Image: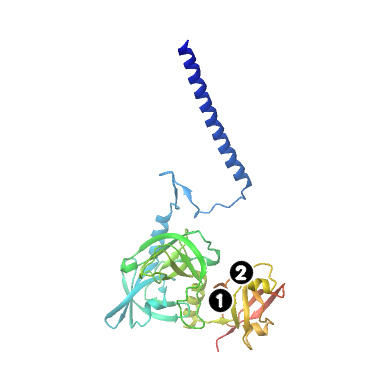
Amino acid sequence: MKRSWLIIAVSMLFSAVASTSLSYYLFQNWWIEEVEALAEPREPRSYRPVLTEANDVWGAPDDFVAISERVTSSVVNVQVFDGISPLGGGSGVVLTSDGYIATNYHVIEGASRIQVTLNDKRELAAKIIGTDPTTDLALLKVRATGLRPVSFADSDDVHIGEWALAIGNPFNLTSTVTAGIISAKARNINILQGSYSIESFIQTDAAVNPGNSGGALVNDRGELIGINSAIMSERGSYEGYSFAIPSNLVAKVMDDLKDYGKVQRALLGVNIAEVNEFVARDLNLPVIAGVLIRSVTPGGSAEEAGLKAGDVILRVNGINTNSVPELQEQVARFRPGDAITLEYVREGRQYTKENIRLKGLK
């Protein structure tokens, strides 16, 4: 009799446990289904984490191998000399099959001789076509054919959190690839000198060290989104903060240097400042956004277009400008004589001004 009661009790216990487990399973799946139903549909992007079958963990895209193989052939090692004495080195990115190469100005500054080593180990002499210290860019040329140029991406389409790969030659270790994510955009770290310097860096945590300067920062499709230029460090080596010049700005400067031998800098003719909570309140802005015009240059493009001190620029040609670096970068992509459209706020009302003709340095 006791044995029968024991069997019944054990059976009831297992039944209760099974019922509880089933209830948790059903609740868990109901909650997931409800959340998924409420979530907005999103187009899948290859940079988003994927569950790999190999290890059942959240991981990076599985095409880094193909990207690395393709892009390393477009990145070169740049060595600079003062006569026969080495000055240092860095990296460069192949722009055309006939030998035009982008690098940083600070990599080749002061050089009397430049040597480029291709990914296939060929060593070639390079000459400087042009430089632009205000963006820390330089254009080189080697006598070669059949090189593999990098493909450019639209850096305006880069988003924080996307995967990024840095390719270069840190500490003269050729064809080094590191991976990370986009940490921020339009960073100004006050590293470039001069009144007309443009700092609107893409920040990433991909490992970048001395020697990476001038190398490629690419997206998860192997397209160039920036030229690696600087790191922020207390020790002089990588600490998780790397900065690259956006590819859209690179493309414009490289075209200028190739076509004219120097950069063609367009100016709006304004003195600008960030918009914060107090500025937004004082100017009756609907949101904290845009860039404040503190003053306009007499005879400059902004004055001729009717812009005034106190106006807040929201967009250039439809691109949001929510910081000083963003506005500077957008204007720097144009040449003197080009026309742009500005959207701005004045005394709480929004206006659009088209066909603002930009001027250049005098």
Q: Secondary structure at mark 1?
A: helix
Res. 23 image quadrant: top right
Task: Locate the C terminus and report the quarter of the image it occupies.
Answer: bottom right
| Residue 157 placement, left or right of 175 | right
Residue 343: horizontal and vertical position, in percent? 67, 73
Residue 91 % position (x, y):
37, 71
Query: Looking at the image, which is closer to me, 149 or 344?
Result: 344
Q: Nearer the viewer, residue 95 or 113?
A: 113
Residue that badge 1 annotates: 328
Disc 2 residue type (three-letter): Ile
Residue displayed at 63% across by 83% down: 295
Q: Say whether residue 183 is visible.
A: yes
Q: Which residue is mark 2?
A: 319
> Percent x, y for residue 56?
43, 43
Instruction: Say whether residue 153 is left or right of residue 280.
Output: left
Return the residue nearer the eye: 19 or 88: 19
- Mark 1 vs mark 2, foreground winner is 1
- Residue in view at x 72 percent, y 75 percent: 347
Counting from the top left corner in percent of width and height, residue 71 is at 41, 63
Q: Judging from the image, what secondary structure is the residue with disc 2 in?
A: strand
Query: Neighbour class for label 2 at 10 Å: few (<14), some, many (≥20)?
Result: some
Residue in view at x 41 percent, y 78 percent: 105
On the image, which quarter does residue 90 sit in?
bottom left
